[in-house]
Amino acid sequence: MGFSGIGIWQLAIVLLIVVLLFGSKKLRHLGADLGAAVAGLRRGLTAQPELPQPTATTQEQRHEP
């Protein structure tokens, strides 16, 4: 018995049906897209937000009355 009473044979049959329905090429692209999305999410969570650098016009505007 596997997950919640689902055996290895049931999982193999479900996998076979999914491959027959979608085809291995489409599943390969789906897996690649999902992996890229997860990698982008991880980069977004760990990246430091970039603060805008003050420009010369911003500094000049502060000194003008």
Image (cartoon, grey):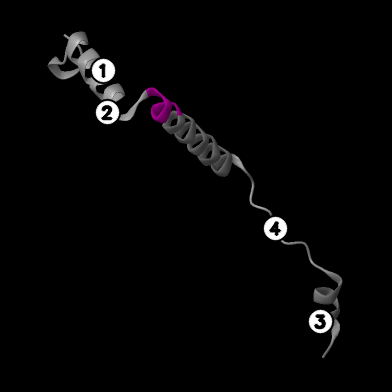
Q: Say which mark, if any, is on residue 51.
A: 4
**Which residue position is annotated with label 3?**
61
Upstream in the sequence, badge 1 or badge 4?
1
Taking the spot 46% from the left edge, 31% from the top edge, the residue there is 29
Taking the spot 23% from the left edge, 22% from the top edge, the residue there is 17
* Eye-nearest disc, 2 or 1: 2
**Which amino acid does the dot numbered 2 rest on?**
Leu
**Which residue position is annotated with label 2?**
21
Residue 61 locus on image (x, y percent): 81, 81
Q: In this view, does 39 lie above or below 55?
A: above
Taking the spot 86% from the left edge, 72% from the top edge, the residue there is 56
The quarter of the rendered structure image containing the N terminus is: top left
Measure the C-alpha gap from mark 4 to mark 2: 48 Å
In this picture, which residue range is highlighted in magenta?
24-28
**Which residue position is annotated with label 1?**
16
The image quadrant of residue 4 is top left
Measure the C-alpha gap from mark 1 to mark 4: 50 Å
Mark 2: secondary structure = helix
* Eye-nearest disc, 1 or 4: 1
Residue 11 locus on image (x, y percent): 22, 16
